[in-house]
Image: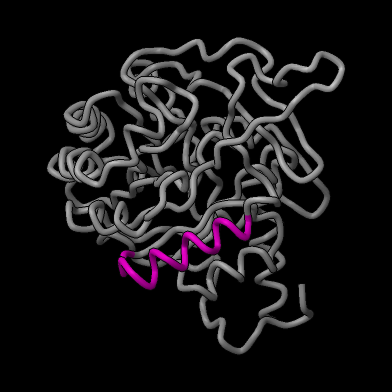
Amino acid sequence: MPPSLPTWFDLDPVAPFTLGGREIPGRIWTASGCFAYGLSGHDMAAPGFASPYAGIGAVVTKTVTPAPRSGNPMPRLAETEVGAINSIGLENVGYDVFCRETLPELEARGVPVIASLAATRPEEFGTMTARLQEVAGDFAHWHGIEINLSCPNVAEGGHDFGSDPGTVAECVAAAREALPGRPLLAKLTPNVADIAALARAAGDAGADAVSAINTVIGLDVDLATGRPVLPRRFGGYSGPAVLPIALAKVDQIVQQARVPVVGVGGIASAADALKFFALGCVSVQVGTAQMRDPFAAARIARDLVRAQS
């Protein structure tokens, strides 16, 4: 990270900005699944930080599905030298518990939240979003929805579900109709030939922005056994190794789809975040680095602010 920011960067990363007609507290977010539901940060401490929420604009929650999911068999996570492969399988408490317990607790704790939703049929995004509106429509800290169209680990709702522009449009349109006044984001898979086509479909159907990218399909082999390290063989690859892939996909969207982009993929430092802003991203999410260090996003926000002064 340079001692001062480049002259082209004129954003305040910790100042509120408007997205989808709503004011979001800042531009540095945590990525879905990488800070759980965002409930436990108040119990954490690190030198120089009041909490891991310091300077963060939003916590994108762990993805929630219509029914609870127990997730895939263990092991679900394998680290490599330059990243990690996961096959969590969307383990979550289910939508009823999320609406009844998790979201009200996040509101009570003042955590800025983007709720991540996944479904197996496009119309379910509409019913889930409508329920969220009923439960949390007057919440001050619930800022919007990110629909997860691209998790490659779940057969019913995996990358095939989100790799077709027509299906992406159906999912976005269903959620859009039930979500007035809050931003709607579509998280896109990079495991396609033309991610810009997905982004255009999402934007045309009413998404305020797209989140790019989700994980890349990956596999690693345990040389002791000669078998893949994960029981389901494939997983979602993330971490520093995917950063150039994410930058390339973001650039395709910015140049060809002209939909606001929230950049995600391999961000572990303020310099990494700046690369996404340089391409035109309106915000960034910190994923794998946040799993390793719960203060990663807060450190990036702090480092950007310090470099501005």
- What's the magenta region? 243-259
Residue nearest the observer in this picture, 239 or 13: 239
Residue nearest the observer in this picture, 193 or 198: 193
Residue 215: % across, % down: 54, 41
- Left or right: 309 as drawn, with respect to 158: right
Residue 241: % across, % down: 69, 51
Residue 247 lies, with reference to residue 9, above or below; the image says above
Tally of marks: 0
Q: Quadrant of residue 160?
A: top left
- Left or right: 260 as drawn, with respect to 35: left
**Quadrant that contains the N terminus:** bottom right
**Quadrant that contains the C terminus:** bottom right
The residue at 44%/58% (across/down) is: 262
The residue at 66%/42% (across/down) is: 288
Residue nearest the observer in this picture, 161 or 270: 161
Residue 104 lies, with reference to residue 8, above or below; the image says above
The residue at 66%/54% (across/down) is: 298
- Left or right: 38 as drawn, with respect to 202: right
Residue 69: % across, % down: 44, 13
